[in-house]
Image: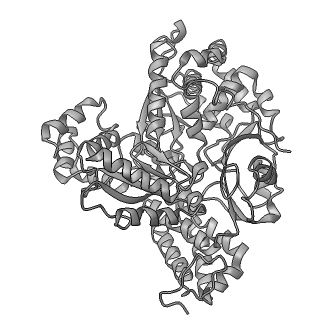
Amino acid sequence: MLTNQQIRDVVQKYEDGEENILAILLKLQEASGQNYISEDCAVEVAKELNIPASKIYDLLTFHSMFSTKPRGKYIIEICKSAPCHVNKSREIVKMFENELGIKMGETTADKLFTLQFTSCIGACDIAPAAKIGEKVYGNLTKEDVKKIIQEYREGGK
Amino acid sequence: MAKIVELITENVGKVRPDSLEDYLNASGYEALKKAFKMTPEEIIEEVKKSNLRGRGGAGYPTGSKWEQLHEIDETPKYIVCNADEGEPGTFKDKIIMDKDPFKLVEAMTIAGYTFGSNHGYIYIRGEYPLSKKTMQKAVDLAKEAGYLGDNILGTDYSFDIHIRTGAGAYVCGENSAQLNSLEGKVGRPRIKPPHLAEVGLFKKPTLVNNVESFAAIPYIVLNGGEKYASFGTKESGGTKLVCLSGNVVNRGVYEVPFGTTIREIIYDLGGGMPEGRKFKFAQIGGSSGPCFGEDKLDTPLCYKETGKNGLIVGSGALLVVDDSNCAVDFAKCISEFFVHESCGKCTMCREGNRQLLRILTRFTEGKGCKEDFALIEQLSNVLPISSFCGLGETATRAVSTCIELFRDEFEEHIEGKCRAGICSFSEGGK
């Protein structure tokens, strides 16, 4: 949980706060530890920037990268767009689901991973692709999926 | 045989993206120095001569766009680089930002100088966090070395570039939606007119160009518009970055002169299908582009010929689909994308895409019926005329062209058959 002071610190780091609202919210979401923006957090940002909280809610629900509900520490985003689709991304969806024991859209019980779809991430030359944070993984095979999850499990606890 | 020409990708893979020195050694900033000795009118004249057209997808003549902004007296003016390449299958702007970021910085500075603008913005999609870092680093280094900021290269011209991020919304690639997003608003498109050249960012005159369009500017300034145009066809000047993806051996970004045929791109550069697979169809211009079959492979990539053949140049995405894929399942995948990305502002785009997906889902479950074809056709006719941005206007194009090509496959699905074996009809199929 972020304290109101921590939230204000993040907001104040940006000049032209309102113009940078997406960057601020992405930063706060990352800092939340649970990859989401809570209602309290949204209200605090709204107060700090002197804009209505409803506007923050509009932004949060409009953009795919935000969540208003807690998610895992790592978000595994599997590309759902056509170039990955024709390279059989459905197979890697199954692999991730089997490996983690959850379905797309769900979070593991240990709160480490959330599985979700993303629109094109520009990794069409290495499709099927997935993205975890800033890292992009391509040409995925069953072995890759196992290895990737193992790495994050070891690094994440 | 298709050939690759390196006008705007000349530095890709040859310079380190975080080294201004490398960029300078590769003749970087020569174009800006030359531009400083030219008048804005002279620069615009070269851009017009180049026949450059907007590379984001719409293909609007860049020279005309620049001329229109130039004729507006109001100040301040803003320069915006649209780096929100959200069209699925497009990954060319990413290459420029990741591999040669200073070229974009230099190009925007030239544009800024041309219009007497002091502020530029690069709007980078949220899905490209690394591109954002690379661009920010380039901007910082350029500023430190006096290529950006106050009194650039000792002149009295000052220009700064601000990097902004999106957060996952395809519609923000639409220029007016993007300006709303840059202002901190939700990125829903604006009604035009007024055009962005008159009422743009913060209601001020604004130039919005795509990354690839900007990246052509240094070459045009340095070598002249005619030289750039000489690489293309009569109407389509220069080169296009083509993003080859899907079921081809060599996927990637290729810079080709306009006039190269689609077949040459797929087979000469892309190496054709993987072994044992056959070409089924291709889609050009991203998910909003049309699907086409073998008979159109010899179409030269240029604005005139693609237009004649019902195709588009669009963003330069070229997705190849082999016979292991199902046309109905593919159409459904595209439809899911538009349902997800419709911003919800126009009723027909919001609800029509949803209905289209419901119908296509029925087909993949073996529950479609003959009457559905008429419904799809109706939606394909209504959406383009009842949506005011490109998203709704083009959302049904892939589906309707898919049906034109593979009506027999759609009909088979009504009978509960999927020749590619992709659709499963277990849940209550006929």
Judged left or right of residue A151, residue B367 is right
Q: Looking at this view, is B308 or B23 the one in front?
A: B23
Q: Looking at this view, is B106 or A156 the one in front?
A: A156
Q: Residue B3's x, y, as percent?
A: 81, 40
Examine the rendered structure and indicate whether residue B156 appears above or below residue B15.
above
Q: Looking at this view, is B336 or B429 the one in front?
A: B429
The single residue placed furthest to the right in the displayed view is B1
Q: Residue B143's x, y, as percent?
A: 46, 17
Quadrant in which the C terminus of chain B is drawn? bottom right
Residue B390 in sight here:
yes
Q: Residue B365's x, y, as percent?
A: 53, 83
Q: Residue at x 61, y 55 (%)?
A: B286
Residue B346 in sight here:
no
Q: Residue A12's x, y, as percent?
A: 23, 31
Judged left or right of residue B278, residue A66 is left
Examine the rendered structure and indicate whether residue B294 appears above or below residue B203.
below
Label count reads 0
Judged left or right of residue A47, residue B280 is right
Examine the rendered structure and indicate whether residue B136 appears above or below residue B371.
above
Q: Residue at x 47, y 18 (%)?
A: B141
Q: Residue at x 60, y 44 (%)?
A: B56
- The colouring scheme, among rainbow, by chain, secondary structure or one colour, is one colour
The single residue placed furthest to the top in the displayed view is B154
Q: Quarter-wise, where is residue B345 in the image?
A: bottom left
Q: Looking at this view, is B169 or B185 the one in front?
A: B169
The single residue placed furthest to the bottom in the displayed view is B430
Q: Quarter-wise, where is residue B306 in the image?
A: bottom right
Quadrant in which the N terminus of chain B is drawn? top right
